Amino acid sequence: AVADLTFIVGSAMGAGSSSFEGAVALDAWTGTWKVERRDKWDAFVAFLGIPAAEEAQAHEFHRLRVEATAFTWECELQGARSVHSLCRVDLDGQVHKALPSSLAFLAAGEPPEGAEWRHSWVEDSVSFKTEVSKLPGKDGITVTLTWRLASQTQASVTVEAGGEDGTVELAPCTAHLNKQSSSGPAPIVWLRARGRPLKTAEQRRAALARVEAMISENLDVISAAQEQDRIFPSRFNGVGQMLIGGAKNYQSLVDAWMVPEKLEDACPALLKAGVEADWCVVNEPKGVCINVSPWNAPVQLSVIPMLAMLASGNHCAIKPPELVPNVSALFRRLCQQYLDGYVWVEEGNKDAVNRLIDEGADHLVFTGGGEIAKHVAARCAWTLTPMTLELGGKSPVFFDKSLDASMLDAGIRETLELKVYKTGQFCCAHDYALVHEGIYDAFCTKFVAAVEALGDKRHVALIGRRQYDALKDKIADAAVECIPPMEGSFVPDDTSMTVPFAGFLQPAMTSKFLTGEIFAPALPILKVRDHHEAIDIINNMVTGKPLIAYCYSQDSAVAEAFVSSVSAGNIAVNSGPQRMISNFNCAIGGIGPSGMGASFWGREAMREFSNRKHVIHAKSGFAKSYFSGPPPAPAC
């Protein structure tokens, strides 16, 4: 099992001095490196127990990308021992016990149980080391790999091993590398060529079961990371149970999805000319899909599209949001531990998104704002990558005069839950309220009472300074009465970045509140004459068609008019979004500016990530084409 330690070493860039500093040095690491020369390497080969003849014939390449807190490397050995591995490792000085099975010790099939790995900088940006201990058959021995960048095109790795008592088990030996190109690791290409198989229903169910285990075994650590990154609510248990249920549901769909769907033959009898054929649709995986997830629900919206991708036989590369670094790093480590070979997690900013797109994926899901989506779509156009865009977008709620007191209370409570408990930073949240003039006063009275009853819970934390400042700007721009008033202790706090939830009465249609998605704990409230005016406002919003339009009414005629007249991705009558997104047979997706396609749930999402391949199989002869004239008349 120790035999493949060289591939862990491989990306190392070792001995010698360097004049590089900071970002220049980090950028210099990125590229494809080839081992050109080894000093005293026979001792290292013997230490590992590798046949010297195998190692002598091998060509060794390493594609690297090094950042301040982690590095990615793709190691390829061409020769008697063929290995091609991909991994991302934290440079944090902490002990890590899980490495992906694709990386090292492939001869044994899985990484060694109990092995420990620690990676840390020796000299910022130019030299770092990996310490490996508790290796099978190497009790009490620590192997140290010191990597050093010597120039823009030269680097080395020095390997040595010592015992706990200070004995030298392996004297220093060095591999020298030359840079071949500036091309770094290519996870999309790697997944397409080296990903774990997902061809059978059993393989797909096994991958989905791993997702189940990843979520169920890590609810508390995910919750802790979300609290660190100001994701509210931070407690992950409820969402986790939904994801586990979704994984189970997809497992139940896999078998039927893989059975070809029969089609009727509508070809005219004259063109058949006596030759019958079978027709079917085969659901073929698209290949490798990218999922760019948002900061407001980073784990939830990384996993939901991933489930559909895996269920339909695709591998997945996820780009989590950089605004939540603790959650993103944890999610990457968990996927590397549980889903190695199925899922790759690429941390970073927009450059990371661009790198993944430029590799030429087979589908991309982007969840986020419309302006960024335009840039993503433009990038995808260059590689003709199909897209699903989940963009949210000003979901209105209409409160009809037919609501009795209990239903009105329920609708107000639902709105508060999304704007306070979910902080309004949720794509399905009610963005603005349209209230029938017949219940407008009662609505405002009940709304104020419900908000005041929150007490200190009325203070809602925004995730970051940009989001906090944007909400304050919208409030100042509106310059209208708010209910309850923002006064006394209930005012924005610049230090904690909290804002008290409030309703804003009758803002102008040209205000910032109504010309862009709010995505924050604030609710514009507009009085309307009837449902016809509400429908007219929704359909003429400058922001375009919403993701979800909510209609709260006990008048069936009003509800029917709303459903038939409002154009939206989804419509919820007397329902909140949680009930809608908890139905694993219901697709959630936008239309126009609120998105295109649907990345969850069920068969609709599986269809999104599949090539619907139509097949004809002639049964009784050759099904001819008749381009030069009509087919022969069928025999009598």
Image: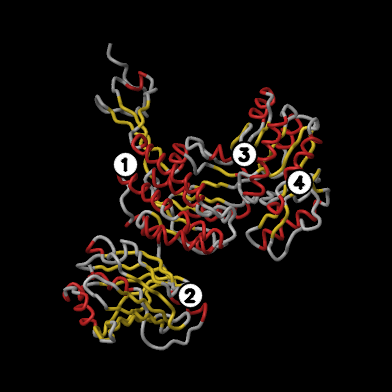
Which is in the foreground here, disc 1 or disc 4?
A: 4
Kind of residue indicated by mark 4:
Gly
From the top left corner, tell me how far across and down residue 280 is, in percent.
35, 31
The residue at 25%/68% (across/down) is 78
Q: Which mark is residue 503?
A: 4
Using residue 62 as the reference point, say whether residue 449 is left or right of it: right
Which is in the foreground here, disc 2 or disc 1?
A: 1
Question: Alpha-carbon distance for marks 4 and 2?
Answer: 49 Å
Query: Mark 3, residues whose alpha carbon is within 10 Å: few (<14), some, or many (≥20)?
Result: many
Q: Which mark is residue 201?
A: 1
Q: Earlier in the sequence, mark 4 or mark 2?
A: 2
Question: Does residue 127 appear in the picture of this structure?
Answer: yes
Kind of residue indicated by mark 2:
Asp
Report how many numbered discs are placed on residues in the image.
Answer: 4
The residue at 48%/72% (across/down) is 69
Query: Mark 1, residues whose alpha carbon is within 10 Å: few (<14), some, or many (≥20)?
Result: some
Q: Quadrant of the C terminus?
A: top left
Q: Earlier in the sequence, mark 3 or mark 2?
A: 2
Using residue 4 as the reference point, say whether residue 630 is left or right of it: right
Question: Alpha-carbon distance for marks 2 and 1?
Answer: 42 Å
From the top left corner, tell me how far across and down residue 411 is, in percent.
68, 36
Residue assigned mark 3: 548
Q: Quadrant of residue 438?
A: top right
Residue assigned mark 2: 27
The residue at 38%/69% (across/down) is 63
Query: Could you say which is closer to the camera, residue 390 or residue 132?
Result: 132
